[in-house]
Amino acid sequence: MRIPRLFTIGVFMTTLIGGSVAAAGPAGAATVRYVALGDSYSSGVGAGNYDPASGSCQRSPNAYPAKWAAAHSPASFSFTACSGARTTDVLNGQLGPLNSDTTLVSIIVGGNDAGFSSVMETCVLGSDSACLTAVAGAQAVAQNVLPGRLDTLFSTIHSRASSAHVVVLDYPHLYKITSLCVGLSNTKRTALNNAADTLDATISAAAGRADFAFSDVRDDFAGHELCSADGWLHSVTIPIGESYHPTARGHSSGYLPAFTASAAG
C-alpha cells in the first residue's frame, strides 16, 4: 500500500497524506507549473519537519513533491496533498490550483479508500486470521469500488488541466519477508504485501485508462522495506501517525527518483 495523499492505532492509520509553496523543473523550468495532489504518502507524513501552516495535512519539505520543486525551481508549485485524503477529498478539496496553464501533476491516492488504516490496526493487534480477513476486505474494495472513484477523479484532473503531464505513483511493499525479524508474522507481512500489489494494480489500470503516466515505486523500495537492513519506512513509532509511512530517506531515495524519471518522460 501505500498504504497510501498508511495508518494509526485507533486513529493509527487515518493520517494517510497536503499547502501551497513556491519554488521549478526540468529543462524549460520557467514554464513548468506543478501541482502535487494526494494523501499522506504525497504530503510527506513520516518525513518530518512539517509546515505548521499545513495543519493536520502534515506537508513536509522532505516529501518528494517539495524536494522535486526545490531541485527544479518551477515557475509555480502548489502543494495540496493532505494526510488522510481519499479520492473524494482530492476531488473536492485539492484541485483548485489546476487550470489550463498547469503543466505537471503528481498524485498518490487510494490507500485510504481501501481502508488500510483499519487493516493495519487489525494486523498489528489481531490474529493472523483476523488480519487475512481484513486484507481480503480491503482488496475487494480496491478491485470493485476504487476503479470507479479513480476514473472520476482522473477524468476531472484531465478536464481541468488538459495540457498537464500527470504522474500517478503507487505504494511500496511494507515488508521484506524474512525469518530474521520480530513483530508481525510472515503470514501477515505477506498478506499486506499482496494487498499493496492489488491496490497498485488498480491504480496502474486507472492511470492507463486516463492516459496518465504510472510510476511503480515497488522496485525503488526493494531491499528497503521493513525488516531489511536499510529500511525506508517507519514501523510502529511515535508519533503514531508516522507509522508505516516513508521516512525522509524513503522520499529522497525512493519516491523522488521515481517521480523525477516520470516527470521528464
Image (cartoon, rainbow, N blue to C red):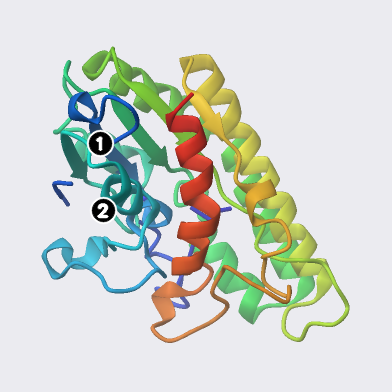
Q: Amino acid at mark 2?
A: Gly
Depicted 1 relative to depicted 228: above or below: above
Q: Amino acid at mark 1?
A: Val
Disc count in the image? 2
Q: Nearer the viewer, mark 2 or mark 1?
A: 1
Depicted 28 relative to depicted 55: above or below: above
User: Which residue is found at the position 43% from the left and 31% from the top?
Assistant: 263
Quadrant in the rendering for residue 123: bottom right
Q: Is residue 173 left or right of residue 250?
A: right
- Badge 2 element: loop
Residue 224 drawn at (x, y percent): 67, 65
Pick out the residue farthest to the right: 179
Q: Is residue 259 left or right of residue 182?
A: left
Compare residues 131 and 245 and report the one nearer the observer.
Answer: 245
Depicted 181 relative to depicted 49: above or below: below
Residue 125 drawn at (x, y percent): 62, 81
Specify few, some or many for label 2: CA neighbours under 10 Å numbering under 14, 14-19, or 20 or more: many
Compare residues 72 and 244 and report the one nearer the observer.
Answer: 72
Compare residues 133 and 87 and report the one nearer the observer.
Answer: 87
Quadrant in the rendering for residue 240: bottom left
Separation (CA) of disc 2 from disc 1? 11 Å
Residue 18: image tag: 2
The residue tagged 1 is 35
User: Which residue is found at the position 61% from the left and 53% from the top?
Assistant: 172
Q: Earlier in the sequence, mark 2 or mark 1?
A: 2
- Badge 1 element: strand
Residue 264: image tag: none
Q: Is residue 239 visible?
A: yes
User: Which residue is found at the position 74% from the left and 77% from the top?
Assistant: 127
Residue 28 drawn at (x, y percent): 27, 24
Q: Is residue 140 visible?
A: no
Residue 139 drawn at (x, y percent): 65, 45
